[in-house]
C-alpha cells in the first residue's frame, strides 16, 4: 500500500485501484483479487454500491448522447476515463456526430495500458489519450490543445473522479481552471459520490475499507458542495439530481437508488 493516497497510483496488483474495482463491478475482466476483495468489503457495507456504479455508467451514456446531440458538442475533454468498456465517450458521441474529437485523461497505469482501445476513432473524428493527473491542469490543457480547438465549445466531463480529489487539493479551483480555458457555450458534466445520500456511518465504514484496502481515499461531498462546481454555468434540466434521475430513457424505471449526484451545466 502506498503511504500517500493522494499520489497517482502505481501499477500494484496487491492493492485495489478505483479503475479496476469499477471495472469489476461493471462486469469487466481487467481486475485482480485485491480489487474483488475491496469491492466485496465495500458492497457488504453498502450493497447499493453496485447499482450506483452501473447507474453512473448509464448516466455517462445519456449525458454524452445529450451533449453530442441536443447540445451540438463536437469536442470532449473526458477526464477520469476509466478502463475502456462498452460505450466509451467517443463511441457514443461519434455514433451521433462522426466528426467529434475526444481527448481522454487518466492517471492510472492500468488505464494507460488499455488506452489503445480508446484510440479507435473513426476517420472523420479523432481521439487522443493523455496520461496525467487531474491536478496538473496546465499539462492537461497544454496537451489537449493538440487535438481540441479551445476557441470553440468543449464538453468537459468529470465523471466519478472528483471524489478522488481531497479538499486540500482544491477540487473547486481545478474545475474553475478547466472551465476558464473553454469559451461560453461549453459544457461541464460531473457525477460525484454523495455524502448526504449515504449517511455518516456508511461513509465512515467505507473510509475505513478504503484506508485498509484501496490505493485511493475518497472524499464524499454533499449536494451543496457538488453544486458549487457548477459556478458560472446554467444547469440543464432536470438540474442536480441522482444519476438515475437525469433524463432517464423513456419507459425505464429503477429498482434501487444511487448515492451519486450529477448535473450538466452550460457555461454562460
Ligand atoms: C470510477 S472511474 C470512472 C470512469 C468513467 N469516468 C465513468 O464515469 O464511467 C474513475 C477514474 O478516475 C481516475 N482518476 C482518479 N483520480 C484521478 C486523478 N487525480 N487524475 C486522473 N485520473 C484520476 C481513476 O484512475 C479512474 O480510472
Image (cartoon, rainbow, N blue to C red):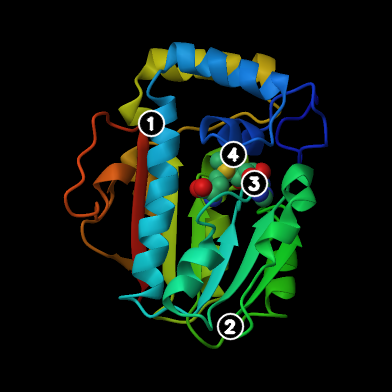
Check disc 1 and report the residue beneath it: 51
Instruction: Identify the residue under disc 3.
Output: 83
Q: Nearer the viewer, residue 97 or 213?
A: 97
The reply to whether the residue tagged 4 has its Cβ within 8 angstroms of ligand 1 is yes
Camera-near label (4 vs 3) is: 3
Q: Can you identify the residue that label 2 sits on?
A: 150
Which quadrant does the N terminus fall into?
A: top right
Circle nearer the N terminus (1, 2): 1
- Relative to 81, does residue 223 appear above or below in the rendering? above
Percent x, y for residue 82?
62, 47
From the viewer's side, name the closer residue of 22 and 98: 98
Q: CA distance from mark 1 to mark 3?
A: 18 Å
Residue reaching furthest left? 251
On-image quarter of the C terminus: bottom left
Say which element carries label 3: loop
Mark 3 within 8 Å of ligand 1, using the beta carbon = yes
Instruction: Identify the element where label 1 is drawn.
Output: helix
- Which one is earlier in the sequence, the residue at label 4 or at label 1? 1
Q: Residue at point 42% right, 43% down? A: 56
Task: Give the structural element (helix, strand or loop) at label 2.
Answer: loop
Coordinates of residue 197 in the picture (x, y in percent):
31, 29
Question: Could you tell me how far apart the alpha carbons at marks 4 and 3 are, in whole angstroms?
Answer: 16 Å
Amino acid at each position: 500500500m502506498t503511504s500517500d493516497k493522494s499520489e497517482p497510483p502505481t501499477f500494484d496488483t496487491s492493492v485495489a485501484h478505483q479503475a479496476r474495482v469499477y471495472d469489476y463491478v461493471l462486469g469487466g475482466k481487467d481486475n485482480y483479487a485485491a480489487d474483488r476483495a475491496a469491492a466485496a468489503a465495500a458492497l457488504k457495507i453498502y450493497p447499493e454500491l453496485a447499482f450506483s456504479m452501473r447507474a453512473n455508467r448509464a448516466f455517462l451514456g445519456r449525458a454524452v448522447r445529450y451533449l453530442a446531440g441536443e447540445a451540438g458538442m463536437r469536442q470532449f475533454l473526458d477526464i477520469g476515463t476509466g478502463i475502456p468498456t462498452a460505450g466509451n465517450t467517443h463511441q457514443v458521441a461519434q455514433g451521433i456526430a462522426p466528426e467529434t474529437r475526444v481527448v481522454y485523461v487518466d492517471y492510472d497505469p492500468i488505464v494507460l495500458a488499455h488506452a489503445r482501445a480508446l484510440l479507435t476513432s473513426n476517420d472523420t473524428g479523432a481521439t487522443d489519450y493523455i496520461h496525467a493527473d487531474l491536478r496538473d491542469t496546465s499539462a492537461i490543457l497544454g496537451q489537449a490543445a493538440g487535438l481540441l480547438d479551445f476557441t470553440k465549445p468543449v464538453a468537459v466531463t468529470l465523471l466519478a473522479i472528483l471524489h478522488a480529489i481531497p479538499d486540500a487539493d482544491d477540487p473547486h479551483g481545478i474545475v474553475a481552471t478547466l472551465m476558464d480555458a473553454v469559451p461560453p457555450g461549453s459544457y461541464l458534466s460531473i457525477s460525484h459520490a454523495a455524502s448526504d445520500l449515504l449517511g455518516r456511518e456508511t461513509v465512515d465504514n467505507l473510509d475505513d475499507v478504503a484506508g485498509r484496502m484501496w490505493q485511493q481515499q475518497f472524499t464524499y461531498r454533499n449536494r451543496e458542495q457538488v453544486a458549487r462546481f457548477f459556478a458560472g454555468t446554467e444547469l440543464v434540466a432536470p438540474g442536480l439530481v441522482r444519476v438515475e434521475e437525469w433524463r432517464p430513457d423513456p419507459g425505464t424505471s429503477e429498482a434501487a437508488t444511487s448515492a451519486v449526484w450529477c448535473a450538466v451545466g452550460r457555461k454562460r
